[in-house]
Image (cartoon, rainbow, N blue to C red):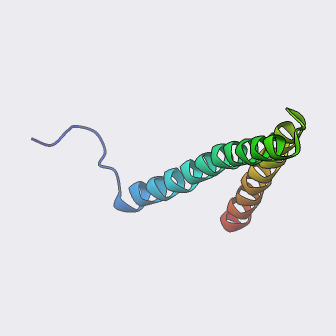
Amino acid sequence: MLPTGSPQKGSDREAFMIAFGVYSAVGIQLVLSIVAGAYLGQWLDRRFETDPWLMMVGIFLGAAAGFYNLFHLVNWKNRRKN
């Protein structure tokens, strides 16, 4: 038996799935860039004995790279709508 209500169009569902995939990828990239920056900074701290400073720099650089990617995607999405 079919559910009551208006059926969802295929194009609406596809648009939702594309948007969901893009935004989840950006979220994953944001987290991975911060983790990679922290890991690289920690490795450099052990190598040069500068304990937490390079790790903190790595976290901030990873966050900056992740947010840059996020803003780039949002601007792309807004240009695409127009």
In the image, residue 7 above or below residue 80:
above
**Viewer-proximal residue, 80 or 37?**
37
Which residue is rendered at x = 47% and y = 53% of the image? 16
Which residue is rendered at x = 74% and y = 66% of the image? 79
- Residue 17 at what x, y percent from top left? 44, 54
Quadrant in which the C terminus appears: bottom right
In the image, residue 59 above or below residue 23:
above
Q: Is residue 51 left or right of residue 42?
A: right
Q: Is residue 10 left or right of residue 60?
A: left
Quadrant in which the N terminus appears: top left
**Viewer-proximal residue, 10 or 48?**
48
Q: Quadrant of residue 35?
A: top right
Which residue is rendered at x = 77% and y = 48% of the image? 62
Most extreme residue toward the top is 52
- Residue 21 at what x, y percent from top left? 50, 54
Q: Is residue 25 left or right of residue 37?
A: left
**Viewer-proximal residue, 4 or 39?**
39
- Residue 66 at what x, y percent from top left? 74, 50
